[in-house]
């Protein structure tokens, strides 16, 4: 599929869903650490502008995020919920709020069904929003697990991230399309 075909498909069919990873897509990833408090969450440049371009083009925009800081005992489940609520409150001021934040609180070694690349969060989203059709969904992420998650569900996958990532070649090869950041992807929908 070509990018122009993808954009035309999204614009012509109202049921497309946009799945976004959080850390590295919406906010800065803390390398070797975690966002444990809202004041540590630094929204990446032009994310709000990207959401302005994307909001209204998709049936739903949802976040699916691995947050093993909870499983490691570094913060509580409710604290992550609070971070998401505060982020959405800020986005709501500009009418670009995310429809829902889903996150996996488990450690990588727990073997749960919700930690990406496993697909539990996608089915949780579909349970909340039954109109979600994975074949009419796009997954945007900055890690190989995001792209694997999207592929296993039949989604179109978008890699966003820096050129110096360790396994970038492998991720780019697996992803359907790649961009520097969410805003660059969102530019496809400008004046559409």
Image (cartoon, grey):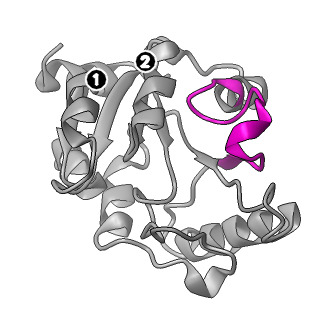
Between circles 2 and 1, the one closer to the viewer is 1
Q: Give the range drawn in magenta.
A: 100-120
Residue located at (60% from left, 87% from top): 39
Q: Residues within 10 Å of mark 1 (few under 14, many from 20)?
A: some
Q: Position of residue 173 (x, y in %)?
A: 20, 25
Q: How crowded is mark 2: few (under 14 residues within 10 Å), some or many (20 or more)?
A: many
Q: Is residue 151 left or right of residue 89?
A: left
* Residue 125 visible to an observer of this rendering: yes
Nearest to the observer: residue 29 or residue 178: 29
Residue 140 versus residue 187 in the image, above or below: above
* Residues at discs 2 and 1 in contact (Cβ within 8 Å): yes
Residue located at (15% from left, 26% from top): 3
Residue located at (49% from left, 61% from top): 96
Q: Where is residue 67 in the image (x, y as percent from the top left)?
A: 67, 54
Would residue 118 be counted in the magenta stretch?
A: yes
Q: Which numbered disc covers residue 151?
A: 2
Q: Where is residue 12 in the image (x, y as percent from the top left)?
A: 31, 20
Pointer 1: what residue?
174
Nearest to the observer: residue 3 or residue 96: 3
């Amino acid at each position: 599929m070509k990018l122009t075909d993808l954009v035309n498909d999204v614009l012509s069919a109202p049921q497309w869903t946009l799945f976004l990873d959080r850390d590295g897509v919406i906010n800065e990833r803390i390398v070797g650490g975690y966002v444990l408090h809202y004041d540590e969450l630094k929204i990446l440049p032009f994310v709000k502008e990207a959401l302005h371009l994307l909001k209204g083009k998709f049936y739903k925009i949802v976040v699916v995020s691995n947050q093993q800081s909870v499983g490691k005992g570094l913060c509580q489940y409710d604290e992550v919920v609070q971070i998401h609520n505060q982020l959405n409150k800020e986005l709501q001021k500009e009418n670009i709020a995310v429809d829902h934040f889903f996150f996996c609180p488990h450690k990588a070694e727990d073997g749960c069904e919700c930690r990406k690349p496993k697909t539990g969060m996608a089915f949780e989203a579909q349970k909340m929003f039954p109109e979600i059709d994975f074949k009419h969904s796009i997954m945007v992420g900055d890690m190989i697990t995001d792209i694997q998650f999207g592929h296993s569900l039949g989604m179109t996958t978008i890699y966003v991230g820096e050129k110096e990532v360790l396994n970038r070649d492998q991720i780019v090869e697996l992803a359907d399309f790649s961009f520097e950041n969410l805003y660059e992807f969102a530019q496809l929908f400008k004046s559409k």
